[in-house]
Amino acid sequence: MDEPRFAIYFVPGADTPLYRFGAGFVGYDCYSGGEYGPPEATGLGLADWKQLTQAPRAYGFHATLKAPFRLAQASTENELLTAFRRFAATPRTIPALDPVVRSLGSFIAIVPASPSPAIDLLAADCVTAFDQFRQPLGAQERQSRLGAGLSQRQVEYLDRWGYPYVLEDFRFHMTLTGSIAAADRRSDILALLQARFAAMVGSAPVQIAQLALLRQDAPSIRFRVICRAPLIPAAKKAAKRPNH
């Protein structure tokens, strides 16, 4: 019997232009479990679009903060839910980003226009705070990760945190496509997505104002949101009055 996997993601609100753009393009709504066909006016055929979006469709439109993991044997789902809500309720600086569509290696994603220390800190906190709930990687899973050409530091992160792209190697991104090997083809898809993003979403800043806990019941089943929690902003310090 397959053990479920859990993950902590930033998933935009279901009614936001950003989510409608991303979920509409990858073809899956991780809130409802509903599926979409290829967006209109993209010029992509059904088979082409399915192949292009197959990888991100399994996870839904999101940014990873704590990568998928199986529960440690000593932990329960209810304990994870409680810790998730408690974590979100801890006051903090609410991160924000100016979203842009760019190529990341061979795939295309939404990324911040400039680095955000607040986003990086939130991701690092998620990695460390929830690691107690993570079952160690199995040998086969670890070996498959090692085949991706990791750096020595990434191998160390894989063994310590169960995922190589954390802490200094974390890069906030919301994936829109799978790998596109041909540079010309990637450039065409990038231009298409940039134009569609500008029309549907625009350039307004996006706050990372909520977290989502997702569950995947089996490898053949897509991730679904099982809990959302708003992040609580840190109280602003009152200005000191001058002494008279």
Image (cartoon, rainbow, N blue to C red):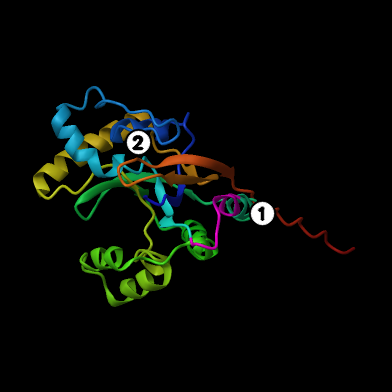
In terms of secondary structure, where does tag 2 sit? helix
Q: Is residue 33 above or below residue 212?
A: above
Q: Which region shows up in magenta?
A: 72-81
Expressed as whole percent of the image width and height from the top left, the position of residue 61 reads: 37, 40
Residue kind at label 2, given as amino acid type? Gly
Residue 84's disc number: none
Identify the residue shown where x is 30% and y is 67%. 142
Give the Cα distance between marks 1 and 2: 29 Å
Residue 234's disc number: 1
Please identify the quarter of the rendering in which residue 217 is found: top left
Q: Is residue 169 found left or right of 96 in the rendered image?
A: left
Please identify the quarter of the rendering in which residue 69 is found: bottom left
Please identify the residue farthest to the right as the structure is shown.
244
Residue kind at label 1, given as amino acid type? Ala
Expressed as whole percent of the image width and height from the top left, the position of residue 54 reads: 23, 40
In terms of secondary structure, where does tag 1 sit? loop
Identify the residue shown where x is 26% and y is 25%. 37
Image quadrant for the C terminus? bottom right
Between residue 105 and residue 88, name the one nearer to us.
Answer: 88
Q: Is residue 5 found left or right of 75 in the rendered image?
A: left
Question: Does residue 204 belong to the magenta stretch?
Answer: no
Please identify the quarter of the rendering in which residue 237 is found: bottom right
Q: Is residue 81 found left or right of 43 in the rendered image?
A: right
Q: Is residue 42 above or below residue 177?
A: above
Label 1 vs 2, first from the N-terminus: 2
Of tags 1 and 2, which is closer to the observer? 2
Residue 22's disc number: 2
